Image: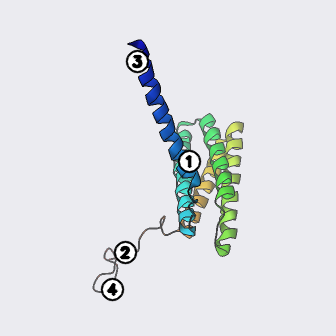
Amino acid sequence: DPDGMSKARWGVAVAVLLAVLAVLVFRVGAEPQRLTDDQVAASRFTAGHRVMAQQRKHLQALLNAFLTGDSEAIGAHSEAVAKDMTDVARTFPPGDPEQASGSWRAMAEIVEQSRQMAAAAKAGDYRMAYTSYANLTSRCIECHQLRRSVGAFPKPAASANGKAKDAP
């Protein structure tokens, strides 16, 4: 019976619609969950880590572009690094006032080196572009050594005589 089949489908559709409305009404009436400072910090770290992972890809692509002499890729990835670091500076301002000035200065230098690299690549000045790349990566490493313990080699473990195990 075609009419019976159609009524059954309408019945299911109405039931699904009512269930969705019930869920929405329940959620709208619920009190909003407040985030703790730790949850906000963790969220910022996760988002910041994603940006830094993307930066790592750009830096690797830049090295490959220098090795192959691809000035267009150098320009594109340089601009991407500058844009991402500008976004990081706007989105994730340093919290500790003592580290803030150093962090802001490092981010500004990275953006400047990225822009200089892009301009040098566009002008066909490989040496200047590569110098900017070296300066940029140096600032990246310096900043990460200041901000956290990663980016530094662990100190060698001492042996029984007090010397490093690998020392002569």
Q: Amino acid at mark 1?
A: Val
Of residues 116 and 67, the one drawn nearer to the viewer in this rendering: 116
Residue with the mark numbered 1: 25
Residue with the mark numbered 2: 156
Coloring applied to the structure = rainbow
Tell me: 118 left or right of 55: right
Of residues 61 and 97, the one drawn nearer to the viewer in this rendering: 97
Q: Amino acid at mark 4?
A: Gly
Q: Position of residue 167 (x, y in %)?
A: 34, 76
Residue closest to the far top: 1
Determine which of the numbered discs, if any, sits on residue 4 in the image: 3
Q: Position of residue 149 (x, y in %)?
A: 49, 69
Residue with the mark numbered 4: 162
Residue at x 55%, y 54% (from the top left corner): 47
Residue at x 58%, y 54% (from the top left corner): 29
Q: Quadrant of residue 168?
A: bottom left
Q: CA distance from mark 2 to mark 3?
A: 80 Å
Q: Position of residue 67 (x, y in %)?
A: 52, 41
* Mark 4 residue crowding within 10 angstroms, few (<14) / some (14–19) / many (20+): few
Q: Position of residue 48 (x, y in %)?
A: 56, 56
Q: Amino acid at mark 3?
A: Gly
Q: CA distance from mark 4 to mark 1?
A: 69 Å
